[in-house]
Amino acid sequence: MSILIKGGTVVTAEGTLDADVLVDGEKIAAVVTREAGGTVAERADEIIDATDRYVIPGGIDAHTHMEMPFGGTFASDTFETGTEAAAHGGTTTIIDFAVQAKGTGLEATLDKWHEKADGNCAIDYGFHMIVSDVNDATLKEMDALIGDGVTSFKMFMAYPGVFYATDGEILRAMQQARTSGGLIMMHAENGIAIDQLVAQALAAGRSDPVHHGLTRPPELEGEATHRAIVLAKVADCPLYIVHLSAAHALEAVAEARDDGQNVFAETCPQYLYLSLDDLARPDFEGAKFVCSPPLRTPDHASALWRGLRVNDLSVVSTDHCPFCFREQKELGRGDFSKIPNGIPGVEHRMDLLHQGVVAGEITLSRWVEICATTPARMFGLYPRKGTITPGADADIVIYDPVATQTISAATHHMNVDYSAYEGMEISGKVALTMSRGQVVVSDGQFRGPAGHGGFLRRDRCQYLF
Ligand SMILES: [Zn+2]
């Protein structure tokens, strides 16, 4: 079965091209510029018209949490609903997090996450491993996981008593990663200090959602980011800062990169488009915007856009971690520290970042680069994923840049009862999403088949090897 995508503008990280794309089976067979006047059309079984539309590599969301356990509840999207929503929004690969529980081994944890995802995903998926129990056995298992295609390991300087790792544990894991070629990903917030501020706020009767933000000041993200960078330097290990939200943290990353250290960072759409004002919405509405690190004041967003332009921030992921307002976010009524942390977003990352193109914050190619190409390289999937070139997987999105849409919980496909971007007008819309040659979404309809997505064994970070 071959498909010709005809008449569109192919957009990659390198630039734009008036070209037709021939898909043969699961792969891209040819990219033919129209001036060349090729004859590929005659070879295709089916033709898809992409006139006036962008033809882009499918998005790669390198930070999602489907079905994640948190504070006695689970993120509301399953691998099935979450990946279907991702496909609607033009994302064709997710990298989700397997979560090590204390006392459980890494391989056993990975097996458990394979069980959750296997046969349930609409698009391809990979895993990172959250390491929450650093000991000799776990460290050894990190090497084995790299062989299993799980080449990145997330650690936490936040959440004492849950995921928190001490500086010594982090250093040991970094030393291990240095030897085996793993990439350490860091949630960089000073959780020990934050817990004191949280206890003080609650004792003083400050229990509303906005205090989630006020007890996690940007200075404590900046401090932890700097500390993670220093530990990585001592261990001579590469480092990837997840969900960077504060200008203070960005400064630390920029300085390390200028010094030649292998430090990378991602940010998320919520830090670009939402703010502390949303957390302060009355009647507990602010709970919808509780995530960690928290939303910041708008001046931080301007710094993040600049970081994206100059590549101190090289990836935008969602940290998709949906909890319903009713019954889940509500667990924290009267005590903000009990509100499950997370914002839904896997469906809207490509659209939200396209607004950055519309607003002149980033170029069209940069949009593709930060949403698809760099995540592919960062997490060992390039050039199979993340670009449009012969031999690559036919993960292709046809994007209509002039269509308009309004984001709403009433129309989104994520399994969550609210949208953090309710009512936001978007210029641009996915017209079609193809996963390995299979049209999975067209005209706003999911075409399946369910379970089409497969597990991706990833290579090591391609900026380093
Ligand atoms: Zn996360």
Image (cartoon, grey):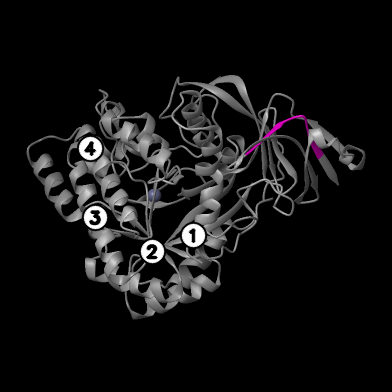
Amino acid type shown at disc 2:
Pro
Question: Pointer 4: what residue?
Answer: 213
Q: Alpha-carbon neighbours of circle 3 within 10 Å: few (<14), some, or many (≥20)?
A: many
Depicted 234 relative to depicted 63: above or below: below
Circle nearer the N terminus (2, 4): 4
Name the residue: 35% across, 59% down: 260
Q: Nearer the viewer, mark 1 or mark 4?
A: 1
Q: Secondary structure at mark 2?
A: loop
Residue 246 lies in what quarter of the image?
top left
The percent coordinates of residue 157 (x first, y second) are 26, 57
Circle nearer the N terminus (3, 2): 3
Which range of residues does the magenta coloring cover? 4-11
Q: Is residue 311 left or right of residue 216?
A: right
Q: Which numbered tag is attached to residue 238?
A: 2
**76 magenta-colored:** no
Question: In the current view of this chain or complex, which residue is farthest to the left?
Answer: 204
Q: Are marks 2 and 1 in contact (CB under 8 Å)?
A: yes
Name the residue: 74% across, 25% down: 51
Name the residue: 46% across, 67% down: 109
Give the Cα separation between the discs numbered 3 and 2.
14 Å
The percent coordinates of residue 165 (x first, y second) are 26, 64
